[in-house]
Image: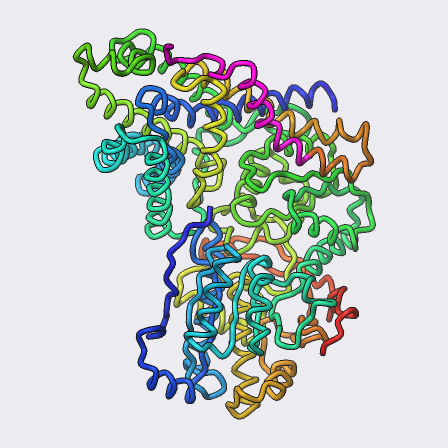
Amino acid sequence: MTAQLLLVQALNGLQFGILLFLVAAGLTLVFGVMDVINLAHGVQYMLGAYLGASLAAATGSFWLGLLLALPATLACGLLLELLVFRHLYDRDHLAQVLATFGVILTLNEAVTLLWGSAPLQVATPALLEGGVTLMPGLQYPLYRLAILAAGLATAGLLWLLVEHTRAGALLRAGASNRPMLAALGVDTGRLFLLVFGLGAMLAGFAGAMAAPILSVEPGMGDSVLILAFVVIVIGGIGSVRGAFLAALLVGLVEVLGRSLLPDLMRLVLAPSPARQAGASIGSMLVYIAMALILAVRPRGLFPARAG
Amino acid sequence: MAIGRRAVLGVAAAGPLALPAIRARAQAAGVKIGLVAVQTGPQAALGTQLRDGFLQGLKHTGGKLGGLPAEVVMIDDELRPEVAVTKVRAALERDKVDIVAGVVFSNILAAIMRPVTETNTFLISTNAGPSTFAGRGCNPYFFTTSYNNDQVHSVMGQAATDSKYGRVFVMTPNYQAGRDAAAGFKSRFKGEVVDEVYVPLNQLDFSAELAKIAASKPDAIFTFMPGGLGVNLVRQYRQAGLASIPFLSTFTVDEATLPAQGEAAVGFYSAAPWAPNMDNAANRRFVADFEAAYGYVPGSYAAQSYDAVLLLDSAIRKTGGSLADKDGLRAAIRAAEFQSVRGNFKFGANHYPVQDFWLCQVAKRPDGKFQTETVRKVLENDTDPWAAECRMR
């Protein structure tokens, strides 16, 4: 493993982390501010990918599709809030898990009925075709750099929103102490609707952005959801800053672990068992890291909740 | 996540509401097939191919098998073995199916093997072909119209050897079928395996592996990435500018995934006993009519199911429509006197096909759709490696 390859892998890790952040940002807001376990966040990500793909195909432009997917996923989020989530705020987490799991089943089937079960194709926009050569024989696709940029921009905008606007102050207050916020006369119902819509839109944006590099298919949100939960638990539930750092950490651990471990294991084991053990442990590494971090900081890196 | 509708779908009027008397009469006059095809979850596209191929076959036989009116009872296994067993049992006991066919995935086949064959019912796999039932585990009531999985991977190993690739990078998912794929490839590959990488089954982003491939500069890569894994890998492989390294694969670029892979997969290789462009009368008719009826290019899942219909049609005709004479029916199936879309087709002693295998390559057709096309024949009349261990009782 050369230093050059190591650098490329680190970049890959950061890039994967940014993608995770796009998904996790909405999840941490909804979980942190509203205290609702939203398992359906993954299917909102999937909806974003499908809507982005269909709208891009209908308008003939990836960018127009992406732009239109935002209000479309926002509308889906608002609808879900009014139909389902509104009735869950006062229930315990078990009821929320059951209900949002139901939303997963329903939406996955709905997507299969509407779009079929075969994966969809989403072309990379012409503007971002091609790539930059990072090492001999390997191109780094421009589109992945665009994802990096989009993730950083989202992080920046969210930071501005959360830290420097009145709505952001309410968000932070909601994440920190909800009953006090309600006691102060803030309309929490409207705040929650707003937060949930924003969360759905962020998930949809992540899905639409990921569509050209990942397979757009029913159930695509399920595998992302688990990593997104790992990210927000490590970052501290409700903290956007925590989610950002945790996403980068998870991305790096995941990619570097997967690429380095099999080689490291070969120092102590025969090649064949080393490969399999390395691959197996590599895929567990994220969860091991989560366990270690939670052992030291049980409330995550940047806990948002007071008390 | 496999998610389910619980109902057993009847294509024709089937099932619990039929009056017993009517059912008895229909049974005497016709043949009932339980068709196991996954219809829920991310792999449903494969089940759809399998189902449509089977139904296309029935269209060509006039809805009959060997002269008997055929009725299909759809069984959605949901890709969950326990669900498959429950539904198949129900089909056997309640719907009284005469034959069970279909099955996309090996783990589902393994689950329903005993429940079906214990009742002396014939089980015709039209896709899943694990080596488990090819050697010591072979069964007189089990046939497959597909292949032995190991064979397909080894075909790619042979093709790599024939192409004089000296150094090949091997990458498969980290589960049993993935490890079998790597072993199958290596069984006929004479060159050096530069590196073997096993990735998690739910892998999304292959950038780490792609960087490794670029760093080790192999003559070719061999991979087995079914379904969505393959869609992700193929696109990212192309985007990373690695397409100058030949992409040898099994079950990664096929007609089920090509609509999503599109241009990114053009020129990539796969190994198969059949491809849509095969030039024989039976195949031309199948592909043309299938595309007209279903609007997409059939894959091997569809072709093998279509063959299964023609096989059953020929066998039941041979026994004069008698389904009760199991030994007679078995001999008639084993004879395989039908015109396969693959051209050559016969059964070996273990009821797995003895057939030719091809190196195929993805191409864009003039009408803008994508399909795999034969490049050259790699193995001729190949018997699978486990057949010798089979002692058919």
What segment carries the magenta color? A279-307
Residue placed most toward the observer, B374 or B389: B389
Residue A56, image x, y percentages: 35, 38
Q: Tell me if residue A129 comes above or below residue B183 in the rendering.
A: above
**Magenta segment includes B232:** no
> Is B9 placed left or right of B216 in the picture?
left
Residue B286, image x, y percentages: 49, 71
Q: Indicate the colouring scheme.
A: rainbow
Judged by its main secondary structure, the magenta piece is: helix
Quadrant in the picture for the C terminus of chain A: top left
- Could you tell me which residue is drawn at 55 percent across and 77 percent down? B121
> Is B317 placed left or right of A95 in the picture?
right
Quadrant in the picture for the N terminus of chain A: top right
Residue B191, image x, y percentages: 82, 46
Residue B248 appears in the picture as rendered: yes
**Magenta segment includes A280:** yes
> Is A96 placed left or right of B289 in the picture?
left
Residue A222, image x, y percentages: 45, 39
Residue placed most toward the observer, B71 or A179: A179
For the image, the number of numbered tags is 0
Looking at the image, the residue that sits furthest to the top is A164
The image quadrant of residue A292 is: top right
- Could you tell me which residue is drawn at 57 percent across and 28 percent down? A287
Residue placed most toward the observer, A24 or A62: A24
> Is B116 placed left or right of A242 in the picture?
right
- Could you tell me which residue is drawn at 33 percent across and 86 percent down? B21
Residue A53 appears in the picture as rendered: no
Q: Tell me if residue B99 comes above or below residue B27 in the rendering.
A: above
